[in-house]
Amino acid sequence: MADTFDAQRDRILAGLHSHGMAFAELGRQFGASTGLHSTDAHALIEVLGAQDRGTPLTQSELSQRIGLTTGATSSLLNRLEAAGHLRRVRDSADRRLVTLHATDGVDGMVDEFFDPLADRMGAVMRDYPPELLAGFERFLTDVCATMTGYIGETSARRS
């Protein structure tokens, strides 16, 4: 029984790894299609995603998400701002808090590149029962929480 579990675990982890590699390649191709460096494209996608979820990122949060120092992130944000892709907004309640927002044109750039993939992914998901997809959502949530916790632990050990 343990051998079966170990083999399945290894196959699932390999699948998650393949997904991560494909996701990174999509980011690189999105950057190339828009004339952005892959790191800038990754940052822009993170900013837009957080904005769409109603929780805009701060510079510090973006630094953590994309794995850059605050100085490197500042330079990246300056480039995106100068290109007209991003703006920094001061919070009205706490003027010290600055959040990052993609400009109006960015939605169109991202949609043009990713909508065909979203349509294909929707077609794949329609072949699975809602209960299975709900279980998969829970699984991914748990996997991400486990990975985030481990990242925090390893970061603390290096500090």
Image (cartoon, rainbow, N blue to C red):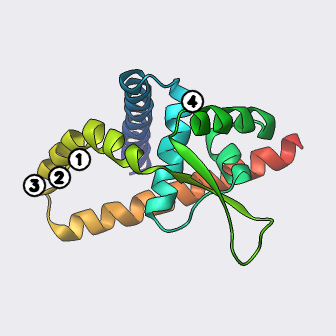
> Along the line of sight, which residue is nearer the eye, 156 or 102?
102
Q: Name the kind of residue labelled 4 in the image.
A: Thr
* Among numbered discs 2 and 3, the one appearing first in the sequence: 2
Left or right relative to 72: residue 113: left
Position above or below: 158 against 51:
above
Judging by the rendered image, the residue that carries numbered circle 3 is: 127
Name the secondary structure under disc 4.
helix
Q: CA distance from mark 4 to mark 1?
A: 22 Å
Quadrant for residue 67, please give it: top right
Query: CB of mark 2 within 8 Å of CB of mark 1?
Result: yes
49, 19: nearer the viewer: 49
Measured as percent of width and height from the top left, residue 116 is found at 19, 40
Q: Position of residue 32 (x, y in %)?
A: 41, 21
The kind of secondary structure element at disc 1 is: helix
- Residue picked out by circle 4: 39
Q: Which residue is mark 2?
A: 122
Of residues 142 and 56, which is closer to you in this image? 56
Whether the residues at callouts 2 and 3 have beta carbons within 8 Å, the answer is no
